[in-house]
Amino acid sequence: MPPAAPAAAQPKRVGEPSPALSLVAKAHETLQTRIVGCLVSDGADAGVVDGLRKAVEAAGAQLRIIAPKAGGVAELTKESAAVDFVRDAFGHLKVIGFTAAARPLLARAGIEVSEADRGLVAIDGPRGDAAFVSQAKKGRVWEREPHVRTVF
């Protein structure tokens, strides 16, 4: 690769960002009126999904089940649309709840599960649904942004 071309002009910072104009700073920690997508595959634990639904609805949101086909679902690691769905959610800085069975899908999407990313929440453990709702209420995972893109 050739070296990057020099900038025609250096960017100028006119002033400091205004907290009064920041939408992120004013955002309330809530799930009210939001829709939470739940991507499922064959063998999905109905108890985990039901627990998540109850927690999400108690927070004022709706849970929508996403599956490759009506009346049944397929192995998602082989579905490019499912891989893209997860990759897009991660790149859009969304909170992602997952089960142990979903780890291969995350890996296929290039997502490394790490405790350093508060937006990746295991929901199949004790109180996993509550942990997911707690993180999802905070909105996007802005601290992930420098790791998913270099152009702002």
Image (cartoon, rainbow, N blue to C red):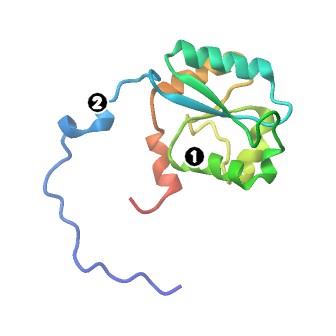
Q: Which residue is mark 1?
A: 90
Task: Give the structural element (helix, strand or loop) at label 2.
Answer: helix
Q: Position of residue 56 (x, y in %)?
A: 57, 19
Tally of numbered discs: 2
Q: Tell me which residue sits at (43%, 22%) in the image.
A: 30
Type of amino acid under label 1: Phe
Q: For the point 81% across and 53% down, which residue is it?
A: 78
In the picture as drawn, the residue positioned furthest to the bottom comes out as 2
Q: Residue 58 is drawn in which quadrant?
A: top right
Disc 2 marks which residue?
26
Whether 65 is drawn above or below 126: the answer is below
Give coordinates of residue 33: x percent, y percent. Answer: 45, 23
Q: Name the N-terminal-most of marks 2 and 1.
A: 2
**Between 115 and 101, the one nearer to me in the picture:** 101
Q: Is residue 128 above or below residue 1?
A: above
Q: Amino acid at mark 2?
A: Lys
Q: Position of residue 144 (x, y in %)?
A: 50, 46
Foreground of the two, 59 or 15: 59
Q: Residue at x 46, y 62 (%)?
A: 150
Mark number displayed over residue 64: none
In the image, farthest residue toward the right: 43
Q: Considering depth in this image, is 92 or 7 the residue closer to the camera?
A: 92
